[in-house]
Image: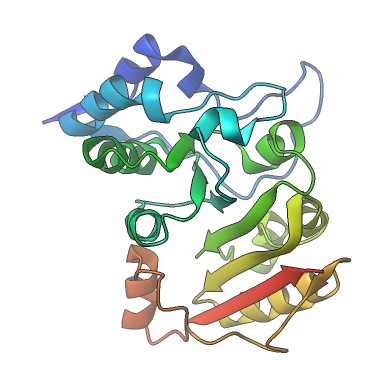
Amino acid sequence: MQENQETIYQDIPELKWVESREEGTEREVKSYVLRSSYLRTYQVEAVKKYYATYGLAYEKRILDWKQIFGNDKPVVIEIGFGMGTATERIAKERNQYNYLCLEVFLSGFAKLLDKVGSQQLDNVRLMRFDAVQVLTDMVGDGSVAGFHIFFPDPWPKKRQQKRRLIQKPFTSLLASKLSKGGYIYCVTDWEEYAYQMLDVLGSTEGLENPYQGFCPAVTWRDTTKFEKKGLEKHHPINEVWFEKQ
């Protein structure tokens, strides 16, 4: 049985909107295009049951990490976690970190929320909102230990490539939020996009590539659904790692 996402919006109206834009202003180019989706009953119930504990709403104020997580562990932000498979494993195995997980697609948001809530993963918080606005309005400069960006949409057609997430000025925004020694970790199965990531991050002030090129496979990242699809098509999996100097 499936239930429409409108059921959730009636109970938690703040989840209906993934961006905040002043009336009369032009829409910026986004790296995503929202589509309507139906949720399974367990996903709807998970949002109703767990959102108050593990969800965060967009507000134009800087987040206090200690207040949110109840401790001083460093914070990693994941942008676009998809179905949350890798996120769940990383949060459990690398529990010396706290995780703020951003995703605009409600199906994946609800699925990860179910995993987090049912297992009481207290080092995870979720937001359904545009990452650029969250970082700009809610994350303090120099306050983030790392960013995870796994298999962002490659927008392969030339006319679409302006929608790609990893490009300036977004990478400069990421760099400004990192603490010294913090990292940006990106993975893609689209080779041309992987080289673009190297070029753009390599030319972003304050960042350095300790591997010069692609980094070795990171063992604590689980295989995602998008990665499996890429491997089935014999796409190379390229991993990119940069650090804040």
Figure check: 86 above or below 57? below
Residue 6 on image: x %, y % = 34, 18
Q: Quadrant of residue 231?
A: bottom left
Residue 196 on image: x %, y % = 71, 75
Horizontal side, residue 173 vs residue 68: left or right: right
Residue 72 on image: x %, y % = 58, 42
Which residue ends up furthest to the top in the rendered image? 10
In terms of depth relative to the viewer, which is nearer, 88 or 180?
A: 180
In terms of depth relative to the viewer, which is nearer, 175 or 154?
A: 175
Figure check: 23 above or below 36? above
Horizontal side, residue 242 vs residue 79: left or right: right
Query: How many numbered marks have been drawn onto this rendered protein structure?
Result: 0
In the picture, the quarter occupied by the N terminus is: top left
Task: Tell me what residue is drawn at x 77 percent, y 19 percent.
Answer: 22
Q: Is residue 18 visible?
A: no
Render colour scheme: rainbow
Task: Tell me what residue is drawn at x 74 percent, y 31 percent.
Answer: 137
Task: Tell me what residue is drawn at x 31 percent, y 26 percent.
Answer: 50
In terms of depth relative to the viewer, which is nearer, 173 or 24?
A: 173
Q: Quadrant of residue 243?
A: bottom right
Residue 178 on image: x %, y % = 73, 55
Task: Tell me what residue is drawn at x 41 percent, y 78 percent.
Answer: 219
Horizontal side, residue 162 vs residue 187: left or right: right
Q: Quadrant of residue 204?
A: bottom right
Which residue ends up furthest to the right in the rendered image? 205
Q: Is residue 40 visible?
A: yes
In the picture, the quarter occupied by the C terminus is: bottom right
